[in-house]
Image (cartoon, grey):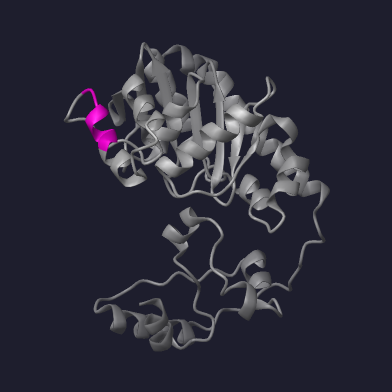
Amino acid sequence: MKPAWDETEARRCGSVLALRAYTSRLIGSDPSLVLHGGGNTSLKLDGTLYVKGTGSDLAAVHEADFTALDLAALRGLLADDRLPDAELMRRVDACKQSPDAPKPSIETLLHAALPRTFVEHAHADAVLAVANVARSAEACAAAFGNHAPLVPYRHSGAALARACISVFEREATPDAIGLILAFHGVVAFGDTARDSYANLLRLVAMAEGHLQKHAVARITVAKPQNPDLAEAERLRSAASALAGHPLAMKVVCTPETLAFAGRPDLAVVSQQGPPTPQHAIFTKRVPLIDGDVAAYAARYR
């Protein structure tokens, strides 16, 4: 994982918030770090939390895409144990310094909870490959040591923010540069834009090193033959009929996809559902593997 930081480009940033937006774009532009525009970043400055607004693509954000919120008010909400999570999240909007600002990220409270100036939250492939396993705590301890304590899975929002506070206060050492969110993603932080960005890449590099150390032999497949386009068209037509409008189909025949499709346990591993909720948003729950589009649609509904 090589940093994309460009010192010349960074010096062109006219403010700390512009620098925050610049490193956010570096993260969002790397598909191995984010999921389809996902992830969120923040900056704490003079009692204000600037957090990426919901709906903006991290790869293309600028200063205007960050929402300014009252940091003390956000932390006050988190400190009130009497507030149910749903009510707490509803009150986050009231902390905006401008009512016309974009809706803040669902992870706003997570960003507010952590004490560091810059915070990055992403869903890096390598980190998920380490953490999304049955013995997650053991794998993460081996991969990240005391650099990133593991936060048990919680729903995004208030529950996750409170879990992060608890783990950070209890387990973070001076060597901590982030947190691993079990079955979710990774958080990195730092006191400068460059350090925080570098800490995210450092955690990803640790995950990559762990995976390489424990890698099994790659599955190789013969060069694929031409795909059965008639079967592909049958599936496309059937899906379009159920959807009620024409759908496009993309046929992908890479060694990796063919190796996965050829697994003897495909009917088991493909139907378990993704372990990361953010994956479910884009891949949906399970793939169709038997060609019965009508039955698949019924199960999906």
Point out residue 211 in the picture as x, y percentages from the top left corner: 75, 48
The residue shown at (51%, 20%) is 116
Q: Position of residue 300 (x, y in %)?
A: 40, 77
The residue under the point 75% across, 35% down is 145
At a point 38% along the width and 19% down the height, the residue shown is 18
Magenta run includes residue 56: no
Please say if 87 is above or below 116: below
Between 89 and 187, which is closer to the camera in this rendering? 89
Residue 175 in the figure: left or right of residue 190 = right
Task: Please determine whether, in this image, residue 238 is positioned above or below residue 143.
Answer: below
Picture quadrant where residue 180 is located: top right
Residue 93 on the magenta span: yes
202 relative position to 185: left or right:
right
Span shown in magenta: 91-97
Q: Say which of 212 and 49 sits in front.
A: 49
Q: Position of residue 292 (x, y in %)?
A: 45, 88
